[in-house]
Amino acid sequence: MKQTIFTKTAFQTILVTAGAIIISILGLLTVTRYDNKYITKAALSQDNLCKVPEKGYCSLVDGWEFYPDVLLFPEDFSSGTPTYYNTWAGEYPNLSLFHEDKNPYGTSTWRLHLQGNGNVLLYLQEPLCAARIYVDGQYLGETGDVSSNHYAPLVKDTAYSFFLDGNAELIIQTANYSHYYGGIWYAPVIGDADSVSHLIASRMLIYGLLFFSSLTLSLFCIVLWTRRDDSGKTVTLYFGMLSLSFALRICYPFLRLFGVPLVSTLYAIEDASSVSGIYFSIRIALLLFLPDGFGRLKKVLRVLSLSVCGIVVIAPLFIFPAIPGLILWYGPFISWYKVIMAFSLISLTVYGGFMGLQHIGIILAAAAANGVGLFYSVLSIGAYEPFAGAYLEEYGAFCMVIAFAVLMVQRSRKMAEENVKLTLHLQEEVEEKTEHLHRLLTERGQLITELGHDMKSPLTSLSNMAQIIRLNDIMLDEDTRRRMIHIEEQCQILSERLKSIQEIAAETSFPVKMESVLLNTFLSDFYHNCRPIIELYGPNFLEDITSRPCHIMANREQLFRALENLLYNAADFTPPDGKITLSLTADDTLAYIAVSDTGCGIPEKDLPNIFRRSYTTRSDKGGQGLGLAITRTIVLEHAGQIDVVSEEGKGTTFTIRLPLLVGDKNS
């Protein structure tokens, strides 16, 4: 069975890898064909003149005259042409090939002959690292300062407009003492103003899409990381940092559009962002695809990637100014490091695919695409440079960002599905526990009721027997008679407590069934039912019920019991010449039921405790303090509240507030 699974996953891994490589190569070939300065370049005439189209644009790749280590002005060519090298843009990354010590720094002059008619726009993309431009002896502008005594680098994309009438001479002076690339490394673009302007806008739009999408993903993941505490927290952080590093790397066109004077720092940040993205990709792959074992391999990859991150920051800022000759090896070192790490990333994902790990397909495809992009970018140095789009390795890195974004979405979706399952399971478990608890309460209530019924008979018999003995005066002396009376009193107390226990059991054993009740009619019936009994006590029993319909959700038996407890309490403490009033009022949302009396009132010190179980102020009358506690419980079960206002010697008012049904609100 394991062999079958391995064969299936291995086949899927090979299929995904091969498909990603083929699609990547086709995509890169398409980009190379339709967005490449080395393809859409200016044609050369027999006289080595670059032909500028009247409509559209082209790149100035071929036909350059290169003068190393010298700054030549237009007047320097009036008496003849100095010695030069025929070259094309991108052939010489710096001046190291012209110096015995391999020092890449110095000044140079680039000269090109143009042929065309009409107004044209010259787009000079990132001259490295200071440049001055002349056309037919006319000074057009400059970035930074090219003079060796006052060298000031400035990384800025510039555009120059001029009129081309037949043939013209383009001279670009460059100086570089701060970067490992120099001169005309990026081919200038020339064409009519509208076409070149649209090209620049398209380039900004594409890079803006790459930058803001990756930046948004990074901020989202970093915020998510700070608010979560789970097994995926580290992966979330690394993905956020991967997206952030790509955003920092891809934002350079915007910085160069406005000009950044800190050239060395800018390129150090760009290189550091590039290799940091590789570092975080490797860390994510190690966490996902090598969770256990391979400790030495993990350590080697981590140390290597971190070391290169440090090198790309330290070398341009501190080492190259002191030892410029090392620059010759820096570019190839970075390129081949990227290729090696791309191969490592592909290997890790292929291993994860062979092991059948989940969500491997998208990462494997992106890793393959990234590897192909890095290989292709190394092989196409000097043969590919985009007009409007990104560079090949930037597309590959963005594939990694998108792939890890999809992976995070898949992981989040899986976690959400698991949470739903856990929630459903928890809900089922709660319902099961609730049902079990309900059965236990029901059984307990039934047991207490049966026990109370069984105890009631012998207790009644004992009380009756003591009463018979006392009343028949069966050879009783005075002391025995008092003891028999005491037995009767204790039996009565036990009977009342047993009744209270049965009431409590009845309150907690069965769920309350609610129904819609018209409170006006219910209270009127309650009043007429209880009036004869209350008036036997002596006080007058009055009613004051509003005519406004008041519908509530209630259990009739429970509500009747609660009002009955309040009413009989009032009757016990109200003198025969007093009165008890049952009233009903309402506002927009609540109904108010009040039971008022003109009795002795409740002492202020007792008011906070009267709803507590077993608290009573009439122990001499045998009260157990359960009536008001039960009443409060019933009111709370009806989503209501009960309050009391009392003053000694003037009476007491209990008020029950119950929510009206929606149909009665605001009526």
Image (spheres, helix red, strand yellow):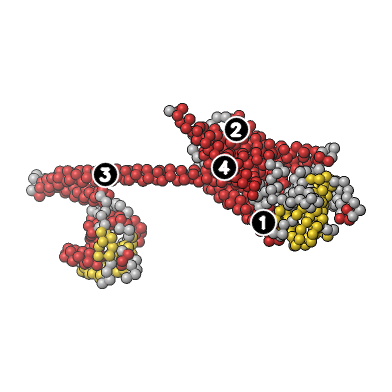
Q: Position of residue 615 (x, y in %)?
A: 30, 53
Marks 4/1 in contact by CB < 8 Å: the verdict is no
Residue 298's disc number? 2
Mark 3 vs mark 2: give the one in front: 2
The single residue placed furthest to the bottom in the displayed view is: 547
- Say what secondary structure mark 1 lies in: helix
Residue 199's disc number? 1
Q: Position of residue 478 (x, y in %)?
A: 14, 47
Q: Earlier in the sequence, mark 2 or mark 1?
A: 1
Which amino acid does the dot numbered 1 rest on?
Answer: Leu
Q: Position of residue 46 (x, y in %)?
A: 79, 50
Marks 2/4 in contact by CB < 8 Å: the verdict is no
Residue 462, quarter of the rendered image: top left
Near-viewer residue (521 or 195): 195
Mark 2 vs mark 4: give the one in front: 4
Residue at position x 78%, y 49% from top?
63
**Disc 3: CA contacts within 10 A as few (<14), some (14-19) or many (>=20):** some
Q: Earlier in the sequence, mark 3 or mark 2?
A: 2
Q: Which residue is mark 3?
A: 439
